[in-house]
C-alpha cells in the first residue's frame, strides 16, 4: 500500500525550495528574541527531536535569541493542545510542535480539538517511518517479522510511541496489510514517546516497534537496534544500511510531516516573525546539519498553504483509516 501523502509532501518540499530562492539569508540576523517550544510527548520521541533540533538550528544561526523546551505528555497530545488553547493570552511566545497525529486523533475523537482551533505557523519537515527490531534478535527483515506474526499473532506484539489507532499503529497496519497479514489481528502496545518505546523493545516486551526513522538512526548506528524497513522510496543517506519496504516487496511508502502551531488569536505581527525565522532557517548551515543528521526531508508549508495541506491530509487519512477499520 502506497500512502499518497508521501508524494504530495515531497512535491510541497520542491515548491517550497523554489519559492524560498534568494529571499532566505544564511543566519546572522535575529528575527525573534525567544521561543518556548511546547512538546506534547515524552523525551526521545519525534516531537521532542523536532522541537529541539529546530531550536538548535534557529539559535545557532542567530535567527532566534534563545529557545526553551517543555515536555507535556498526556491525552495523545491533547493535554498540550488544551493547555495552549486555554492559556492563549499568556502563550504568545510559545510554539507547539505536532505532526500527522493531530489529524488522526481529531478524526478518532481522542481529543475534541483539531488544527483548526490553533494558529497554523508552518509545516517544516518530513520524517520517514521505520520498523525496528532488537539488533540481537532473530528477525532480519520485514518479511521475517511477518512470518513470525503469521506463526504466532498473539505473541508478536508491535510497539509504538502513539496511542492505539495513532500514527505508529497506522504505519504498522499499512505494512502488515501490504504483506497480506491482517492488521486488525496485530497486537499493538502504546508507549509515551520514542525513548519508552525503544526500552520496551530492548526489554523484550514487544518484538518490533513502529517509529520515526530519525528516532531510530542513532540506536541503529550504535548497534542496539536493527531497522528492518523504512518507508522511503529509496534508501536514506543518513543511514543507507536500512532497506526500504519497497525493495523487500512491501508496497508501503510514507512520510510524516512535522510542524509548528501557536495559540489561537496570536497577533499577526508575531505570527509573521515566527514564519520569517522558520523560512530563513532553511538556508543555513545549522539547519542542514540538523536535518541531515536526522534524515529529515524539507517540507515548508507556511500559513494558508499549511492549512490546505492539512485539509487534504485529513481527507486522505480518513479514507485510509476507514479502509483499515480504525474509523
Image (tube, rainbow, N blue to C red):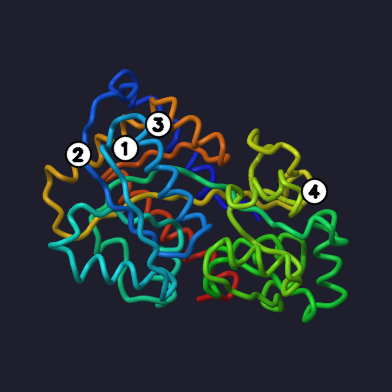
Q: CA gap, disc 3 to disc 4?
A: 31 Å
Q: CA gap, disc 2 to disc 1?
A: 9 Å
Q: Earlier in the sequence, mark 3 or mark 1?
A: 3
CB-based contact (under 8 Å), mark 3 and mark 4: no
Q: Pointer 1: what residue?
A: 278
The image position of residue 35, as x and y in percent, is 26, 47
Please state which of the two labelled residues, at mark 2 or mark 3, is closer to the viewer: 2
Q: Earlier in the sequence, mark 3 or mark 4?
A: 3
Q: Quadrant of residue 314?
A: bottom left
Residue at 20%, 40% (x, y): give it.
33
Residue 248's mark? 4
Residue 273's mark? 2
User: Taking 325 as reference, is 299 left or right?
Assistant: left
Q: CA gap, disc 2 to disc 3?
A: 21 Å
Marks counted in the figure total 4
Residue 15's mark? 3
Q: CA gap, disc 4 to disc 2?
A: 45 Å
Q: Earlier in the sequence, mark 2 or mark 3?
A: 3
User: Taking 96 as reference, is 33 left or right?
Assistant: left
Q: Nearer the viewer, residue 47 or 252?
A: 47
CB-based contact (under 8 Å), mark 4 and mark 1: no
Q: CA gap, disc 4 to disc 1?
A: 37 Å
The image position of residue 167, as x and y in percent, is 53, 63
Amino acid at each position: 500500500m502506497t500512502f499518497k501523502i508521501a508524494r504530495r509532501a515531497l512535491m510541497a518540499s520542491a515548491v517550497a525550495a523554489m519559492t524560498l530562492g534568494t529571499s532566505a539569508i544564511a543566519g546572522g540576523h535575529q528575527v525573534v528574541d525567544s521561543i518556548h517550544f511546547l512538546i506534547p510527548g515524552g523525551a526521545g520521541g519525534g516531537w521532542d527531536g523536532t522541537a529541539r533540533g529546530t531550536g538548535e538550528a534557529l539559535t545557532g544561526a542567530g535567527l532566534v535569541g534563545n529557545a526553551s523546551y517543555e515536555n507535556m505528555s498526556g491525552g495523545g497530545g491533547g493535554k498540550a493542545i488544551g493547555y495552549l488553547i486555554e492559556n492563549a493570552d499568556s502563550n504568545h511566545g510559545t510554539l507547539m510542535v505536532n505532526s500527522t497525529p493531530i489529524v488522526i486523533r481529531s478524526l478518532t475523537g481522542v481529543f475534541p480539538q483539531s488544527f483548526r482551533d490553533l494558529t497554523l505557523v508552518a509545516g517544516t519537515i518530513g520524517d520517514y517511518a521505520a520498523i525496528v527490531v532488537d539488533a540481537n534478535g532473530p528477525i532480519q527483515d520485514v518479511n521475517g517479522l511477518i512470518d513470525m506474526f503469521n506463526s504466532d499473532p498473539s505473541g508478536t506484539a508491535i510497539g509504538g510511541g502513539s496511542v492505539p489507532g495513532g500514527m505508529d499503529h497506522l504505519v504498522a497496519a499499512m505494512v502488515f496489510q501490504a504483506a497480506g497479514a491482517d492488521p486488525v489481528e496485530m497486537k499493538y502496545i502504546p508507549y509515551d514517546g520514542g525513548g519508552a518505546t525503544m526500552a520496551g523493545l530492548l526489554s523484550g516486551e514487544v518484538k518490533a516497534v513502529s517509529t520515526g526513522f530519525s528516532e531510530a538512526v542513532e540506536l541503529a548506528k550504535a548497534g542496539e537496534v536493527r531497522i528492518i524497513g523504512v518507508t522511503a522510496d529509496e534508501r536514506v543517506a543518513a543511514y543507507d544500511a536500512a532497506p526500504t519496504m519497497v525493495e523487500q516487496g512491501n508496497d508501503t511508502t510514507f512520510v510524516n510531516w512535522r510542524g509548528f502551531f501557536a495559540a489561537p488569536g496570536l497577533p499577526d505581527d508575531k505570527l509573521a516573525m515566527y514564519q520569517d525565522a522558520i523560512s530563513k532557517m532553511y538556508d543555513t548551515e545549522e539547519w542542514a546539519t540538523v536535518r541531515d543528521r536526522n534524515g529529515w526531508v524539507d517540507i515548508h508549508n507556511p500559513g494558508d498553504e499549511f492549512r490546505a495541506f492539512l485539509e487534504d491530509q485529513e481527507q486522505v487519512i480518513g479514507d485510509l483509516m476507514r479502509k483499515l477499520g480504525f474509523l
